[in-house]
Image (cartoon, rainbow, N blue to C red):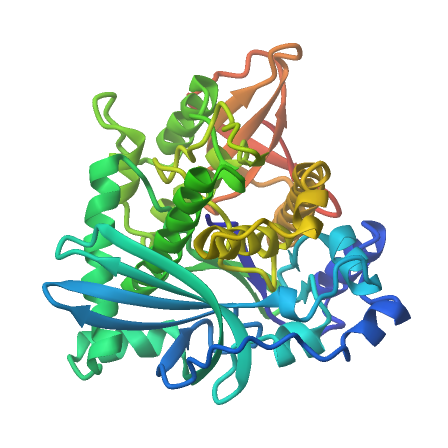
Amino acid sequence: MPRRHIRVTGAPEAPLRAALTALRTELGVPETYPPGAMADVGTPPVLPSYDATDIPLFTIDPPTSTDLDQAMHLSRRGSGYRVRYAIADVAAFVVPGSALDQETHRRVMTLYFPDEKVPLHPTPLSEGAASLLPDQVCPAALWTIDLDAEGRTEAVDVRRALVRSRAKLDYEGVQKEISAKTAEEPLALLEVIGRLREELEVERGGISLKVPEQEIVERDGTYELTYRAGTPADGWNAQISLLTGMAAADLMLAYGTGVLRTLPAAPDGAVGRLRRTAHALHIDWPHHVSYAALVRSLDPRVPHHAAFLQECTTLLRGAGYTVFRDGVLPDITTHSAVAAPYAHCTAPLRRLADRYASEICLAAVAGEPVPDWVLAAFDQLPREMAEGGRRAGAVERACVDIVEGALLKDRVGEVFDGCVVEVEERRPTVGVVQLESPAVIGRIEGAGLPLGERLRVRLTQAGPGPVRFERA
C-alpha cells in the first residue's frame, strides 16, 4: 500500500532542509541506536541448510536504495508461471528479546522524510548483511508461487534458504528493457504476470494507487512543485508483492494463526470529501462511476491527476493489523483496497510486523508450531504497529506542512482558485481548501464556507507551520 512520497533536494544548510532537521529533533525521532543494539548487529546469523543460490534472482528498486527486502525470479511452467520471491530473513539476525529486538519494537517502522529516512534496523544490517544486495549470499524466506495461465494462484510454498541476487535493477531501466523487447525471459515475464494480476485485481474489485512522487526543487531562492509518475514496471513489481501478501494471508487463515493487514470499506464521508477534491481539481467523476474505475482512468503524469492520487491515500488511513490464533478467525479478514485477505510480509527490513507474518507462514507450510517468541508478541503487536503508523502519519503531515509552507512562503497575500473540501461539523467557520494550482491543501476560516464549491481564497500564512487561507 502506498504512502505519500515527497522528495526535497538542496544543500543541508538550505532553509527547507534545515527545517526538516529541526522537525526530527522536535518529534524526538531516534537517529542513533543504543550501544547494546549496535553490539547485537555483530551476532552471527542463523543460516538455513537449504541452498538456493543457483536461482538467478534480481531486485527492482529505486537506483539509490540499498535496503533491499525482495528479490525475484520469474519463469514459465507449462501453460502457467512460477514466481520465486525471496524476502530478507530478518529473524536470522535479530535474537528475540535482545537489545536490538527491543529497539525495533520501539521504532516499529522506517520513517521517511523528504530528505532522508530513519531506518528500523541499523544500516550495517538493513543496508548490509541482511539486505539482498547483488552477489551477496544471505538467508531469506523463499516463496514459490505457481500460477495458472490466467495468473491465478495454484500452489504456494515458503521455506528458509540461502539466496544470492545476481543483479540490482531499477524501475526506469527495467521499463526500457521491457519496452524495447530486449529483456531476458525472467524479466520480460514481469510484464506478462503483472498484467495478468492487474486484470484479476479489476475482476475482484481491488485498486492499486499509482501515487506519484512529489519533488520540491529550489530555484533562485524559491521552490517549485513537480511530480514524478511511476513506470508501468512499478505497478507490475507491486503486483508480485501483493500476490505474495495475499498468499501469506491465505496460508495463515488456513493455519488458524496469523497477522493480517485489514481495512474496512471507506466511510461515505471520506469518499464524499474525495469527490469534492476531484471537483476542485477539475476531475470529472460522474456519480455512476466507482472510485476504483475513476482511479484506473487517471494518468499520474498529469499534474491535477497526480494531486488527486495523492489525496486518495487518505482512504487507506483506517488500515490496521489484526492478529488471531488457535483457529479463532477475526470478524474482518480482508483489506478493502486489495479486495481480499492480505498480509504485510514482504518488507521486514522496514516494517516490524513482516518479520512475524513471515515466521508464521514458514511454520504453516512446515506443519510446525509457531515459535513462542512470535506468539508472545501477539498481545502488543497491533498496538505497536498502530502507534508506529500514527508516528509515521504525524511525520508525513508535519513534512507536508513544512514543504507547502516553503512552496508558498513568498506568496502571502496572493489570491488563488480553490474549493472547500471539508467543513468542521462543530465549527462551520473552519474548513479545508484545496487549491487548483499549486495543488496545496490548507486550512481556511470564515463564515459561510461553501462546501464543495469553488471560490477565491487569500493566503494569510505560509510557514513555519501549516498554510492558512481566508475567503478573498
Q: Is residue 278 visible?
A: yes
Q: Residue at x 31, y 31 (%)?
A: 291
Pick the front one: 348 or 287: 348
Q: Residue at x 64, y 69 (%)?
A: 92
Q: Residue at x 41, y 51 (%)?
A: 211
- Residue 445 sits in which quadrant? top right
Q: Position of residue 44 (x, y in %)?
A: 72, 80
Q: Is residue 303 visible?
A: no
In the displayed orientation, state which residue is furthest to the bottom. Answer: 135
Q: Quadrant of the C terminus?
A: top right
| Residue 203 vertical position relative to residue 140 in the rendered view, above or below | above
In the displayed orientation, state which residue is furthest to the right. Answer: 35
| Residue 253 vertical position relative to residue 60 in the rendered view, above or below | above
Q: Position of residue 105 (x, y in %)?
A: 75, 52
Q: Is residue 99 left or right of residue 392?
A: right
**Badge count:** 0
Q: Is residue 414 left or right of residue 364?
A: right
Q: Position of residue 14 (x, y in %)?
A: 72, 69
Q: Position of residue 418 (x, y in %)?
A: 46, 32
| Residue 62 vertical position relative to residue 441 in the rendered view, above or below | below
Pick the front one: 170 or 38: 38
Q: Is residue 66 left or right of residue 315?
A: right
| Residue 104 vertical position relative to residue 294 in the rendered view, above or below | below
